[in-house]
Amino acid sequence: MTIKEFQDFIRQRYYPTDSKRGTPGTFLWFVEEVGELASALAGAGADKADKEQEFADVFAWLCTLANINDVDLEKAIEKYTVRGVEGTK
């Protein structure tokens, strides 16, 4: 599955609820998931499966934020993947 396909999957499944919640509320959910990922990465008891789950949650919420803000993540990451695109690090 490509990034675009996953973002579209998230849009098809959750967009009505996500768009009603709006960016501020969705961003709070995203930050909560980032916090859970931070805990899994820092925790001695977190196994690989826990970390994978938290990475997946963060990515799903990032896709949600992108969807409700009309951002194509695959296009956005061209900043890093395509030579000559302005803003590459």
Image: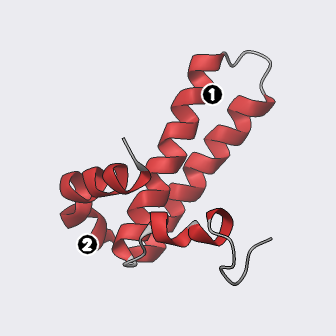
What colour scheme has been applied to the protein in the rendered image? secondary structure
Task: Please name the amino acid that badge 1 sits on.
Answer: Lys
Image quarter (top left, top right, bottom left or bottom right) of the N terminus: top left
Answer few, some or many: residues within 10 Å of disc 2's Cα (few below 14, many 20 plus, some between 14 and 19): few
Q: In this view, does 30 lie to the left or right of 68?
A: right
Residues at marks 2 and 1, CA–CA distance in whole angstroms: 29 Å
Disc number for residue 67? none
Task: Please name the amino acid that badge 2 sits on.
Answer: Lys
Q: Which residue is drawn at 32% across and 69% down?
A: 21
Residue where numbered disc 1 is placed: 51
Disc number for residue 20? 2
Q: Would you identify the image quadrant in which residue 64 lies?
A: bottom left
Q: Which of 5 and 25 is in front in this view?
A: 5
Residue 20 vertical placement versus 53 (above, below)? below
Q: Where is residue 57 in the image (x, y as percent from the top left)?
A: 48, 42
Q: Is mark 2 on a helix, strand or loop?
A: helix
